[in-house]
Amino acid sequence: MGLSKSLIELSGRTLPRKHFIDSLRLHVRGGTGGNGLEKYGGVGGKGGDVYFVAEKKKNSQSLRALHKANPSQAYQGGVGKNSMKMAIKGVPGEDVLIEVPLGVVVMEETGQIIGEVNQKEDKVLAARGGEGGNPKNQFRGQKGENKFVRADLKVLADVGLVGFPNAGKSTLLSKLSRADPRIASFPFTTIKPELGILEYPDKRQISMADLPGLIEGAHMNVGLGYRFLRHVERTRLLLFVVDISGFRLSPNHPSRTAFETLVLLNKELELYKESLVDKPAMLAVNKMDSPDAEAKYEEFVQQIQNYEKTVAEMDESVRPQHLVTFDDVIPLSGLQEWNTDLLKTRVRDVIDYHAERIRQKELEGWKPRIKPLKERGAMLA
Ligand SMILES: Nc1nc2c(ncn2[C@@H]2O[C@H](COP(=O)(O)OP(=O)(O)OP(=O)(O)O)[C@@H](O)[C@H]2O)c(=O)[nH]1
Ligand SMILES: [Mg+2]
């Protein structure tokens, strides 16, 4: 299935860039190597590399600070020193470390991933410094790698909306929060994650990320694919949204029932990263106001109640190995606001339930550690 970004381009839409923050294009260039000194066989210093590393101090949640600190977004490794009579081995150029928040993916301009900064010790080489001059390069210091890269920050949200295009994710978010995402009757309306905040009477707030629609093949970058799948990683709860009438991208594409879209979503997550399937999940069966929805829902419930069995009967090409477990399944209509309050309450309950479970687990492993009082030397009376 050759669907790609062209659909979006064809529609001539511009990217709304409101609340979603985080993508930067940067110019990175490794330092030039120093020249060697042929007469003495001296080797020039290597040019400095450019790396992405985790920021040391605060754990900021955006790339904005980085942009502010260096609006030109150009980073260049230090130049390697020439080999000299007195210093036969040239001193290497200094490496440049670009500090970013955790959760940053560094990519080539083509979208190919160079590496990710997910943990404090992660270090991603973005541009290698040039070799110092040596016999192999006629003692001429080499230029460093020189290119543009993209740094994307994965969304950090309590809840991530996962669904096929057009399932009504953005509509739902607009009803649950004050967010005002773009809504339209064609697939791939949402092309960037956007955040909404669910507010509760006791001032509790839960953040929900509206994500672009996912279709089969997404893990291989079909549709908006990979670029968005990674945003699912940093959410605590996945809220699957399916259209009770199913989905069909175009007359050239197979028509999928609601249940099939669900299984395919499950499969895409699994193919992208198996651990995503183990995340707490809920299911919103949407558009219950459409014709024949009740009858379709009845069938759907049968299938989901026997999820494992129904899936086992499906063709291997669509069948996931590892099934998502849903803490709740709620039929609703985002548009008509049927059951949306219930959903809001249940989202909170499920998040709290899992938080409590994690806390309990931690407590189980907790043992009081009785330390001897610090030994003290003789005290002066
Ligand atoms: N009948 C009915 N239509 C709905 C409902 N929710 C959304 N829609 C319609 O479905 C279409 C798609 O809605 P969106 O909210 O943009 O869907 P989405 O899942 O965000 O789509 P993408 O961003 O393309 O992935 C729009 O025409 C909505 O008006 C619903 O509960 N019932
Ligand atoms: Mg949308």
Image (cartoon, rainbow, N blue to C red):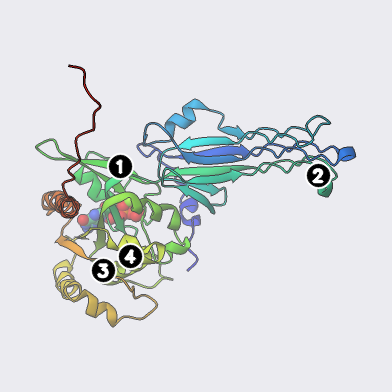
Amino acid tagged 2: Asn
- Earlier in the chain: of badge 2 and badge 1, it is 2
In the picture of the structure, the residue carrying the numbered disc 1 is 195
Label 4 vs label 3: CA separation?
11 Å
Label 2 vs label 1: CA separation?
53 Å
Report the disc number at residue 265: 4
Q: Comparing marks 3 and 1, which lies closer to the viewer?
A: 1
Q: Quadrant of residue 131?
A: top right
On whether ligand 2 comes within 8 Å of the CB at mark 1, the answer is no
Amino acid tagged 4: Leu
* Local crowd size for mark 1, using a 10 Å CA cut-off: few (<14), some (14–19), many (≥20): many
Label 3 vs label 1: CA separation?
26 Å
From this view, report whether residue 1 is shown above or below residue 339: below
Query: Looking at this view, is 300 or 187 the one in front?
Result: 300
Does the residue at mark 4 contact the one at mark 2 (Cβ under 8 Å)?
Answer: no
Label 4 vs label 1: CA separation?
21 Å
In the image: residue 112, left or right of residue 91: left
- Earlier in the chain: of badge 4 and badge 1, it is 1
In the picture of the structure, the residue carrying the numbered disc 2 is 134
Q: Comparing marks 4 and 3, which lies closer to the viewer?
A: 4
* Local crowd size for mark 3, using a 10 Å CA cut-off: few (<14), some (14–19), many (≥20): many
Q: Secondary structure at mark 3?
A: helix
Task: Give the residue furthest to the top.
Answer: 381
Q: Comparing marks 4 and 2, which lies closer to the viewer?
A: 2
Label 4 vs label 2: CA separation?
54 Å
* Local crowd size for mark 2, using a 10 Å CA cut-off: few (<14), some (14–19), many (≥20): many
Amino acid tagged 3: Ala
Query: Looking at this view, is 65 or 166 the one in front?
Result: 65
